[in-house]
Image (cartoon, helix red, strand yellow):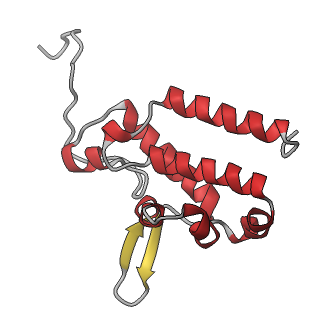
Amino acid sequence: NVFETGHESMVKTCQLAGTRGYIAPEYVLRGRLTAKNDVFAFGVVVLELMTGKPAILRQSPVDGEFQALAEWVRGFSQRPNMYDILGTIIDPCLRSVVETNIVVRNMVMDVVNLGIACSQQEDERRPMMSSVCDRLTVIVSEAKRRGLLE
């Protein structure tokens, strides 16, 4: 019946909706929509803010290859000392203060790690948004306590 009022437990779509770079892998690969899809997109936005780079990076202007920002940052995060490569991935306008102020460096590192956690490939490995809010609250509170924010 067309006018049936029952609720569907699953919605099937024929076409993906979203913007490249922000769409969670489980949605692209299996059409699975969950709350963790939004966590993934939020993680990408956090990484954009910290790196100053777009969600999709052009790897080579000649052959038109692209790489997702989250994937690019994750590649660096698997190195032994993330602090050493922070200067490589961080937005150039933040670089000097990050290199000279250990408190700022730690705060930026916490935010980058949060972005990485939110943009994990597997949705089970991503935090719930409530946990993300809790972590951000701690980061901001610590920054205020240290006089970095008003």
- Corner quadrant of residue 14: top left
Is residue 65 shown left or right of residue 84? left
Residue 89 appears in the figure? no
* Number of numbered discs: 0
In the rendered image, the quadrant that contains the C terminus is top right
For the point 42% across and 79% down, the residue is: 59
Q: Is residue 127 above or below residue 15?
A: above
Q: Nearer the viewer, residue 90 or 60?
A: 90
For the point 21% across and 50% down, the residue is: 29
- Corner quadrant of residue 78: bottom left
In the rendered image, the quadrant that contains the N terminus is top left
Picture coordinates of residue 89, whole percent (x, y): 58, 68
Q: Nearer the viewer, residue 149 or 81?
A: 81
- Corner quadrant of residue 105: bottom right
Direction bottom: furthest residue: 62
Residue 24 appears in the figure? yes
For the point 47% across and 61% down, the residue is: 77
Is residue 70 shown left or right of residue 132? left
Picture coordinates of residue 112, whole percent (x, y): 58, 53
Is residue 1 shown left or right of residue 59? left
Q: Is residue 113 above or below residue 7?
A: below
Q: Is residue 91 above or below residue 46?
A: below
Picture coordinates of residue 126, whole percent (x, y): 40, 39
Direction front: furthest residue: 80
For the point 46% across and 71% down, the residue is: 57
Q: Nearer the viewer, residue 145 or 35?
A: 145
